[in-house]
Amino acid sequence: MTASPISTRRRASRPLALLTLLLAGCANGGPGGGGTDAGGGGGSDAGATDGGGMTMIDAGGGGRDAGGMTGCGAGQHACGGGCIDDQENIPENGCRFGCGEPCPTPPDGAAACDAMGACTFDCPPPFRRVGDECTCAPRTCMDWGYTCGAPDDGCGMPLDCGSCTGGGTCIDGACSCPPDDREPNDSRLTAPRIGSATDAPDTNLVFDTFSLHEMGDEDWFIISVADDFDAGNPRVRVTLRGFPSGDDYDLAAYYICGSGGDSSTCSVGATDNMIGHGCTSTSTGATAETIEIATECSGTDDGGDLVIHITPRTVSGMCGAYEIEVDVS
Ligand SMILES: [Ca+2]
Ligand SMILES: [Ca+2]
Ligand SMILES: [Ca+2]
């Protein structure tokens, strides 16, 4: 019989405790007040902390019902059921007025924050924004500045920008011609010695691996000529031919006596004694050029150096392969 009053007292105490909590909630429950209580509530008082937590939730619910306009103080904004501090305006945390989640971004888009602190996105080229999507806008050969090759259109499809003719290769969208293997030889000082010839026996040399690969190219070569035993001095004949039909190249050749006393004469072509004694041939168009030099030096040895100079008058971009034939007799 002694247990009954105790159990009765326990049942009666529960409504009292709930009422106490509700009253505490009402006392603290003004919008905005919850935040202050939650923040500054006594850490040592378990009852006050509970009341603050409940108030926080109630206030949030009330803010949502009221449109969230009155629920947050300066420097804060509504998020879910409560208020949070305004954030750094970067897309990683949903911008200034986001709720900590990264900004949603469509495929191929780049997240960004607008000046109002809200998420937006950009579509970097070749994509452009269409509604809430980034759509690929294909690029053209002209967009890329390509005149040859097959670059990607930016959307995963190859373009056909043409090919190179005349032995050219497409490098970074432009046709270019590889230099021949005797470059650089654009001056007499860098002229390579490419062969030797004698007048006894007669010598015939043909070179077919050279080219004027660009308008600025000019080619200089040297051939050693020996005056061996026969009836006369070496006669040197040089022919330039075989260059592209749209091109016009000119030829000059000079003879420099090994023993000095240059007095060679130009027998085919126009006399040109810029170096030693020699000739130029400057026909127009793709006509072959030919010169001939009758060598004459001091003493009895008329050996020397034949200096050949090939220059472009017009270049068609066909990589300028040409042929040189040298006859010494
Ligand atoms: Ca060349
Ligand atoms: Ca050259
Ligand atoms: Ca010519």
Image: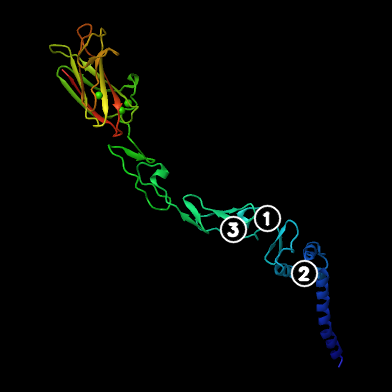
Mark 2–mark 1 Cα distance, whole angstroms, equals: 24 Å
Mark 3–mark 1 Cα distance, whole angstroms, equals: 13 Å
**Total numbered labels:** 3
Mark 2 residue type: Thr
Q: Residues within 10 Å of mark 2 (few under 14, many from 20)?
A: many
Q: Measured along the vertical axis of the image, is residue 273 above or below residue 115? A: above
Name the colouring of the figure.
rainbow
Instruction: First in sequence, mark 2 or 3: give its number.
Output: 2
Left or right: residue 212 versus residue 120 is left
Q: Quadrant of residue 178?
A: top left
Contact? badges 2 and 3 (CB < 8 Å): no
Instruction: First in sequence, mark 2 or 1: give its number.
Output: 2
Say which residue appears at 83% left-offset and 70% top-offset: 27
Residue at which label 2 appears = 55
Residue at which label 3 appears = 103
In this orientation, which residue lies closer to the viewer: 150 or 328? 150
Label 3, secondary structure: give it: loop
Left or right: residue 180 versus residue 82 is left
Mark 1 residue type: Gln
Q: Looking at mark 3, is its residue's CB closer than 8 Å to ligand 1?
A: no
Tell me the quadrant of the picture where the C terminus can be found. top left
Mark 3 residue type: Cys
Left or right: residue 111 versus residue 31 is left
Label number found at residue 32:
none
Label 2, secondary structure: give it: helix
Mark 2–mark 3 Cα distance, whole angstroms, equals: 30 Å
Label number found at residue 87:
1
- Ligand 2 shown in quarter: top left
